[in-house]
Amino acid sequence: MKLLIVRHGDPDYTIDSLTETGWQEAELLSHRLCRLNIKDFYCSPMGRARDTAKPTLEKLGRQAEILPWLREFSPQVLRPHTNRRSIAWDWLPQDWTADKRFFDREHWWDNDRFAQAGVMEEAKWVWQSLDDLLASHGYRREGEFYRVETPNEDTIVFFCHFGVECVLLSHLLGISAMALWQGTCALPSSITTLTTEERREGIAAFRMSAFGDTSHLYAADREPSFSGRFCETYENRVQRHD
């Protein structure tokens, strides 16, 4: 079984849709996805994810099932040294690295600010919803692996967001979501690929073969848009600062 996790195209957050660049990215993405044999499409209820899915679904004459747990990961956390609430991963390096629990796959949610915002409760909702969906496709969670009830080589696609993508990966790969939020960046319209490996009959695990792949953009001589990243050097005033 193969999972394709797609981050939405370059966003216009003010209208929860895509910029002109984002629509172009979604179109190029569709050229790639339409060549694949995809069993099912699933999508976040948010506009920017649905608009990213639109060119692919229209070309194929298909529909995506809208899943509320694929929305952007939503708990609003009070940032250190400020009175401002923001997304859970919007922390400065000198702040989040000071709490070593953030590196631990079994304790990254134990920070007091995360507890107050209900981060763990939302993560568990996402994880359980994912496992329920995978069970419906023949792979049932059992401890740290998946029991294969209906072996298959189906491909399913999730159109969603970077924050929730990292929460999904934290469950499938056994990695702290905070470490993924801080140490990776899936660029707009990128594809992350995970495939089951069943080395012993009936026991499967998901293995990631590509993260944040934007080769469909480079094939069209386009650079990925910058959304989600911060300035490479502080002196670079063209790129995003905090």
Image (cartoon, grey):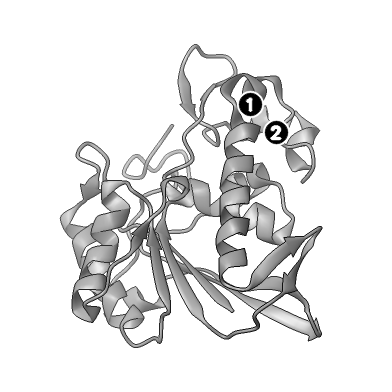
Quadrant housing residue 95: top right
Q: Position of residue 159 (x, y in %)?
A: 39, 60
Quadrant housing residue 96: top right
Is there any visible trace of residue 10 in the rendered image?
no
Residue 131's place in the image compared with 204, above or below, is: above
Residue with the most extreme left position: 20
Left/right placement of residue 190 relative to residue 141 reads left
**Could you tell me which secondary element the residue under label 2 belongs to?**
loop
Left/right placement of residue 241 relative to residue 2 reads left
Q: Residue at x 60, y 84 (%)?
A: 152
Q: Residue at x 19, y 73 (%)?
A: 58
Which residue position holds label 2?
109
**Could you tell me which secondary element the residue under label 1 belongs to?**
helix
Q: Position of residue 227 (x, y in %)?
A: 36, 50
For residue 114, the mark is 1
Cβ atoms under marks 2 and 1 closer than 8 Å: yes
Q: Nearer the viewer, residue 143 or 76?
A: 143
Q: Amino acid at mark 2?
A: Trp
Q: Amino acid at mark 1?
A: Phe
Q: Nearer the viewer, residue 240 or 46?
A: 46
